[in-house]
Image (spheres, helix red, strand yellow):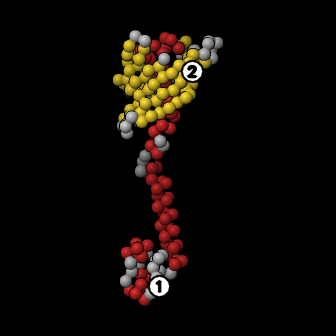
């Protein structure tokens, strides 16, 4: 019988909707608690397995697995990945999250991505190596609606026989079809 239904003669003649959903034929419904429960457990196990494997079976990329993470975690991971790129001497990897039309605030005003790249190479790199290692801390992410976020934090450039440089920054992020991108950077 189906869970929660009394064992009466009427039960076998007219099965409830719940019983029909759990056990599609009368024999399974009349078989008793053990088989019905077993069937229910098999169905539940199937649903759990399908739900777990669906992202891979549907052709989703591993990157889409981050869609389940909170946006703040995704953005902090993205920012820390830029520091890794910087520390390896990969300026293009460091700049990868910046939108093509992103702006950077300098003491003399806004500059675009190309000028930002040129500035970083001139001020902070010798050849293909950074003069100092970059790290971020004191990070805070605040949503600005569903598809934008404000990130604040502290950057530190250290090592290379030079005095440590540290400052604060504000980044404005926007969710795009290609993922989160930085629209504006103000570091001081």
Dividing the picture into quarters, in which one does residue 34 lie?
bottom right
> Would you say residue 13 is visible in this rendering?
yes
Q: Position of residue 90 (x, y in %)?
A: 51, 22
Which residue is at a point 48% across and 17% down the rendered structure image? Answer: 188
User: Which image quadrant is residue 183 in?
Assistant: top left
Q: Nearer the viewer, residue 36 or 186?
A: 186
Q: Are marks 1 and 2 in contact (CB under 8 Å)?
A: no
Name which quarter of the figure residue 96 lies in.
Answer: top left
Label 2 crowd (10 A; few <14 / some 14-19 / many >=20) = some
Residue assigned mark 2: 156
Residue in front for this viewpoint, 70 or 23: 70
In this rendering, position of residue 4 left or right of residue 130: left
In the displayed image of the protein, which residue is found farthest to the right? Answer: 161
- Residue 81 in view: no
Q: CA distance from mark 1 to mark 2?
A: 72 Å
Circle 1 residues within 10 Å: few <14, some 14–19, many ≥20: few
Q: Position of residue 6 (x, y in %)?
A: 46, 82
Looking at the image, which residue is at 64% across and 12% down? Answer: 161
Indicate which disc residue 7 carries. Answer: 1
Residue 12's x, y, as percent? 41, 85
**Would you say 77 lies left or right of 184 here?**
right
Image position, residue 134 (x, y; %): 56, 22
Q: Secondary structure at mark 1?
A: loop
Q: Earlier in the sequence, mark 1 or mark 2?
A: 1
Q: Which mark is residue 75?
A: none
Q: Is residue 41 above or below residue 72?
A: below
Q: Residue drawn at (45%, 39%), measured in percent from left and top?
A: 71
**SS class, disc 2:** strand
User: From what the image shows, is residue 81 above or below residue 134?
Assistant: below
């Amino acid at each position: 019988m189906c869970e929660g239904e009394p064992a009466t003669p009427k039960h076998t003649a007219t099965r409830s909707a719940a019983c029909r959903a759990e056990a599609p034929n009368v024999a399974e419904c009349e078989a008793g608690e053990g088989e019905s429960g077993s069937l229910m457990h098999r169905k539940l196990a199937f649903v759990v397995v399908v739900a777990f494997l669906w992202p891979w079976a549907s052709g989703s990329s591993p990157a889409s697995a981050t869609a389940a993470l909170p946006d703040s975690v995704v953005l902090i991971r993205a920012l820390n990945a830029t520091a890794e790129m910087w520390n390896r001497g990969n300026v293009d990897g460091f700049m990868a999250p910046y939108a093509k039309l992103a702006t950077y605030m300098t003491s003399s005003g806004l500059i675009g991505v190309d000028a930002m790249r040129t500035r970083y190479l001139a001020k902070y790199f010798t050849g293909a190596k950074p003069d100092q290692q970059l790290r971020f801390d004191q990070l805070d992410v605040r949503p600005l609606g569903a598809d934008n976020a404000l990130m604040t934090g502290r950057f530190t450039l250290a090592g290379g026989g030079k005095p440590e440089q540290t400052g604060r920054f504000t980044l404005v992020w926007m969710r795009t079809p290609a993922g989160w991108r930085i629209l504006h950077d103000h570091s001081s």
